[in-house]
Image (tube, helix red, strand yellow):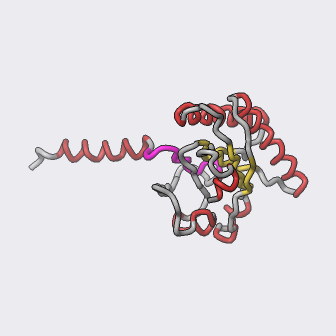
Amino acid sequence: AVVERLAGPGAGRPGIIFLFLSRGRTRAAAARRSAAARKLAAEALAHEGLSVGSWRDVPVRPEALGAEAAASRPTFAQAIVPRPDGLSADAFELRLVAARRRMEAAAREAGLEDFSVPSASCRTVVYKGLVAGGRLADLYPDLAAPLPVSYAAFHQRYATNTHPAWRLAQPFRLLAHNGEINTVRGNREQVRGRAADP
């Protein structure tokens, strides 16, 4: 319902780009950094022949976060990107991926270290956060039940070798990632290798 309201009824499924933007230390600094990041995102989309139809400030409940996560919390925004006429879903998805990669490279060059793109797709929207798994829907009211979607995947990851940071939260753009594939494969191979042991 939110997407249809922003994209317009009958407009077809738009692309949705979820962004983490720096809040800055003061309101003025946050506004400047947010404007620079949104401009960067719009320029990357324009390079791929796309445009921002509208911006959405994603509603959040910061009280769901722990103290450290709340102190480093970014601003959450979604760019709603209309699909150009005559463009297939596959071609649209490729342009959104290319725009995401262009945004990330431009943000690195511009020194926007807190800029992150959890997802850019016309098929999925990724909500990620530096929050205990069971509290994700507490942080994002968008995820409150009932959730009117055809499917939803939930992934929770604990990293022991990095200091937690919003931009490092697992993007989970596909249904599996190498670490889990390798772990499952390794476990199966160990069992297979020991099958002949007495």
Residue 189, percent from left and from top: 25, 42
175 in relation to 67, above or below = above
Q: Classify residue 38 as left or right of residue 183.
A: right
Q: Quadrant of residue 27?
A: bottom right
Q: Residue 93 in magenta? A: no
The residue drawn where x is 64% and y is 54% is 4
The residue drawn where x is 48% and y is 44% is 174
Q: Quadrant of residue 13?
A: top right
Residue 145, percent from left and from top: 53, 69
Residue 52, percent from left and from top: 73, 41
- Hey, which residue is sitting farthest bottom in the picture? 63
Q: Classify residue 142 as left or right of residue 51.
A: left
Question: Which residues are the magenta region?
Answer: 167-176
Work out whether residue 172 or residue 178 is closer to the camera in this orientation and state it.
172
The residue drawn where x is 72% and y is 44% is 115
Work out whether residue 187 or residue 77 is closer to the camera in this orientation and state it.
77
Q: Main secondary structure of the magenta part?
A: loop
Work out whether residue 88 or residue 103 is closer to the camera in this orientation and state it.
88
The residue drawn where x is 52% and y is 33% is 90
Q: Classify residue 36 as left or right of residue 100.
A: right
Residue 83, percent from left and from top: 64, 38
- Hey, which residue is sitting farthest left in the picture? 198
The N terminus sits in image quarter: bottom right
